[in-house]
């Protein structure tokens, strides 16, 4: 995913109302009607729109999949807002890094265990009577041992 990130230290950025392509008068990447409503914290930003604007000490903007040649224009009630184009940090993952790096191994072990259990059950069901259509090999084995113990007492 191609991302473009900008930040603004301009106090006017807190009242930003529009983001759009300076070279195109049609449509906006992002807009809001009421500049008095505070910007959301960056931890609560969703990916619903092409651009997201949030507040994390600075006003931050992340735009996804902009076409080449787009020149972002940030505007507020008082006009143009100054900003700096910055590099985009990696989006946060839901899993912490140590767990994320071990995830393939964990999934592989779980799959192996499930395949082993299904294999044992299948073999067990092959040995049971086809007329009963139930797999009770583990239960039948315990029942025979209990019946044998009762008879020998």
Image (cartoon, helix red, strand yellow):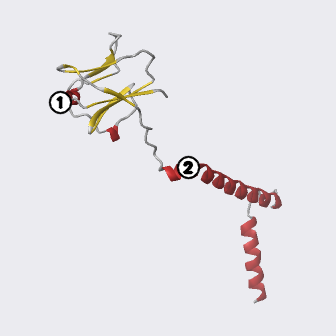
Task: Please tell me the numbered disc located at residue 72.
Answer: none
| Residue drawn where x is 20% and y is 32% of the image | 37
Within-10-Å neighbours for mark 1: few <14, some 14–19, many 20+: few
Q: Is mark 2 on a helix, strand or loop?
A: helix
The numbered mark, 2 or 1, whose residue comes first in the sequence reads 1
| Residue drawn where x is 27% and y is 35% of the image | 58
Within-10-Å neighbours for mark 2: few <14, some 14–19, many 20+: few
Residue at the spot of label 2: 101
Please name whichever residue, 25 or 47, is drawn nearer the observer in this view of the structure.
25
* Residue 24 percent location from the top left of the image: 35, 10
Residue 54: name its quadrant. top left
Q: In this view, does 117 lie to the left or right of 53?
A: right
- In space, the residues marked 2 and 1 are separated at their CA atoms by 43 Å
* Residue 91 percent location from the top left of the image: 43, 38
* Residue 125 percent location from the top left of the image: 78, 58
- Which residue lies most toward the bottom here? 153
Residue at the spot of label 1: 36
Q: In this view, does 23 lie above or below 8?
A: above
Q: Where does the C terminus fall, quadrant-wise? A: bottom right
| Residue drawn where x is 75% and y is 84% of the image | 149
Q: Is mark 1 on a helix, strand or loop?
A: loop
Q: Is residue 81 visible?
A: yes
Q: In this view, does 70 lie to the left or right of 144?
A: left
């Amino acid at each position: 995913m191609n991302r473009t990130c900008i930040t603004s230290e301009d106090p006017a950025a807190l009242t930003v109302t529009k983001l759009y392509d300076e070279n195109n008068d049609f449509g906006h990447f992002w807009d809001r009607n009421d500049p008095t409503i505070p910007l959301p914290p960056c931890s609560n930003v969703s990916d619903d729109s092409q651009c997201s604007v949030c507040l994390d000490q600075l006003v931050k903007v992340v735009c996804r999949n902009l076409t080449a040649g787009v020149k972002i224009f940030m505007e507020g009630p008082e006009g143009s807002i100054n900003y700096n184009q910055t590099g985009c940090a990696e989006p946060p993952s839901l899993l912490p890094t140590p767990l994320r790096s071990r995830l393939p191994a964990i999934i592989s072990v779980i799959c192996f265990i499930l395949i082993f259990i299904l294999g044992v059950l299948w073999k067990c069901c092959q040995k049971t009577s086809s007329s009963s259509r139930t797999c009770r090999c583990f239960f039948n084995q315990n029942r025979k041992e209990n019946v044998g113990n009762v008879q020998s007492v």
